[in-house]
Amino acid sequence: MKIVAADIYDTDLHQWKPPIILRLMTDEGIYGLGEFPLAYGTGRQGAIGMLKDLVERFVIGADPMRIESMWHTLFRRTFWAQGGGPIVYGGMSTIDEALWDIKGKALGCPIYELHVQPHNCHGPIATAAAAQVDACITNFVIQELVPFRDRIAYELVHEPLELLVRDGQMPVPEGPGLAVTLNEELVARCPRVRIE
């Protein structure tokens, strides 16, 4: 399996923090979703540009199952990653999240069974990733949410976990990968960067 294309959606749907969504597509028809964790303020266009550069240079043609290898490639072969910073690390994190989604879907299991990255709760895709991590932590107690989002931000995916909270409890997503499905109709109206 290899990554053959990617879409970057600039979902300018929420005035405070509109998510930037990455969809990586494989030659086997599996796609993975990632959400840029720094998608607000003046860094937004830099975030999209960094994500585009990383995907074009290192991700297209790569094996999505070799996630740790990809992270090291992004870190070692990207000059600015060595020095850190929210834009480059945010791009790496977004790619990482999408690759884990692909791996979970390919293996037919939830991400929490694969024991993955720490949480990052910014929007509905990041919340799904966070819930997967929470489910594999034995002493897990609390998951932060961002309750002040405009309703449209939750419409990026079908059945966002933030709207399923009952009596202070958020369900663990069921299904392979992150267990979220992108609202294709909504993102089709957003600006998109296509990479092949």
Image (tube, rainbow, N blue to C red):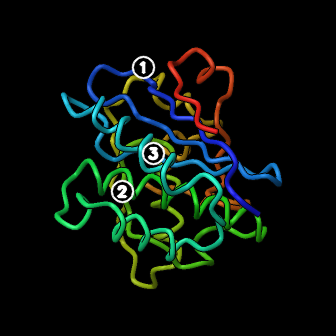
Q: Is residue 51 left or right of residue 192?
A: left
Q: Earlier in the sequence, mark 2 or mark 1?
A: 1
Which residue is at the front of the view, 163 or 37? Answer: 37
Indicate the amino acid at tag 2.
Asn
| Residue furthest top in the image | 189
Disc 1 designates what residue? 13
Residue 129 x/y as whole percent: 50, 58
Q: Secondary structure at mark 3?
A: strand
What is the quadrant of residue 178 in the picture?
bottom right
Q: Is residue 174 left or right of residue 160?
A: right
What is the quadrant of residue 182 in the picture?
top right
Indicate the amino acid at tag 3.
Glu
Above or below, comparing residue 182 to residue 2 in the picture: above
Disc 3 designates what residue? 35
Residue 196 x/y as whole percent: 64, 39
Mark drawn on residue 120? 2
Q: CA distance from mark 1 to mark 3?
A: 14 Å
Q: Looking at the rendering, in which quadrant would you find the N terminus?
A: bottom right
Q: CA distance from mark 2 to mark 1?
A: 20 Å
Which residue sits at x=40%, y=34%? Answer: 19
Labels 2 & 3 near each other (Cβ < 8 A): yes
Residue 58 x/y as whole percent: 50, 57
Other residues around mark 2 within 10 Å, as few (<14) / some (14–19) / many (≥20): many
Indicate the amino acid at tag 1.
Leu
Residue 23 x/y as whole percent: 59, 42
| Residue furthest right in the image | 28
Q: Secondary structure at mark 1?
A: loop
Mark drawn on residue 177? none
